[in-house]
Amino acid sequence: MKLYDLFERCLYIPYFQTGKSANYATETKDNVLYLYFEKSDGENDWKINFDFPAVPYRRSGKTVWFAHRGFFNVWKEIEQKVAREILSKRLKGITCVGYSHGAAIAVLCFEYAWFNRPDLRKNIYGYGFGCPRVIWGEIPDNRWDNFTVIRNIDDAVTHLPPAVLGYKHVGKMLEIGEKERYTPIDAHRSENILTELKRLNI
């Protein structure tokens, strides 16, 4: 599936809501589970976006991973809803997709799938369109190697929380568009991300 089609599906698939800000959707095609996470939708989502003190979310040996508190809390609301599907032995692959606020949740969902499905790791992928930074501190292993952050170059959201506070992007960064083609706010708009993805045809 092309990135354009994947993003368009993320925009228009019907979402379930659990909790105040946890909107997700799932579908399975050819034994591949697709998990979608919706963009910011309302004032409460924006409050969560700015709730960015780092909290511990997983211990791996002697390493403790830290994440954005607001996004972590949203993911915990969703986790129990999708865990059974992620753990299904019928699956041949898993793809996590999100936009904006939802892209941050996709980062944490991807890590959950990677951690809990070692048998599928080569076939677990993630795509965060207009993704903010989610992980704080060091990223010492390769668990996010198959996660791609898609940034329309001047997109303001992809530069938050500020790196100076210790937050980092995970996985690979795919930059689309051109500098100064859009304002930092317009670069984040879905219609402009779609335009740039269509231009790339990937």
Image (cartoon, rainbow, N blue to C red):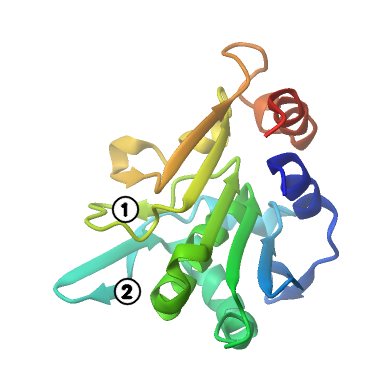
Percent across and percent down for residue 110 are 50, 64
For the C terminus, the quadrant is top right
Residue name at image x 52 percent, y 37 percent? 158
Q: Is residue 158 left or right of residue 152?
A: left
The part of the image, by quadrant, that contains residue 31 is bottom right
* Residue 169, percent from left and from top: 40, 44
Residue type (three-letter) at the residue carrying disc 1: Trp
**Residue under numbered circle 1:** 136
Q: Which of 163/60 is in front?
A: 60
Q: Mark 2 or mark 1, which has the lower sequence index? A: 2
Q: Determine the secondary structure under disc 2.
A: strand
Return the x and y of residue 135 as percentages of the image width and height: 37, 54
Residue shown at the point (69%, 62%) measured from the top left: 36
Question: Are the residues tagged 2 and 1 within 8 Å (C-beta)?
Answer: no
Q: Is residue 99 visible?
A: yes
Q: Which quarter of the figure has residue 86? A: bottom right
Q: Which mark is residue 4?
A: none
Q: Is residue 180 above or below residue 157?
A: above
> Which residue appears at 66% of the width and 71% of the height?
33
Q: Distance of mark 2 from mark 1, alpha carbons? A: 12 Å
- Give the side of residue 192 with respect to residue 76, left or right: right
Q: Which residue is mark 2?
A: 58
Q: Which element is circle 1 on?
A: strand
Which of these two is toward me, 189 or 177? 177
Asked if 97 appears above or below 55 in the picture, the reply is above
The image position of residue 111, as x and y in percent, is 44, 66
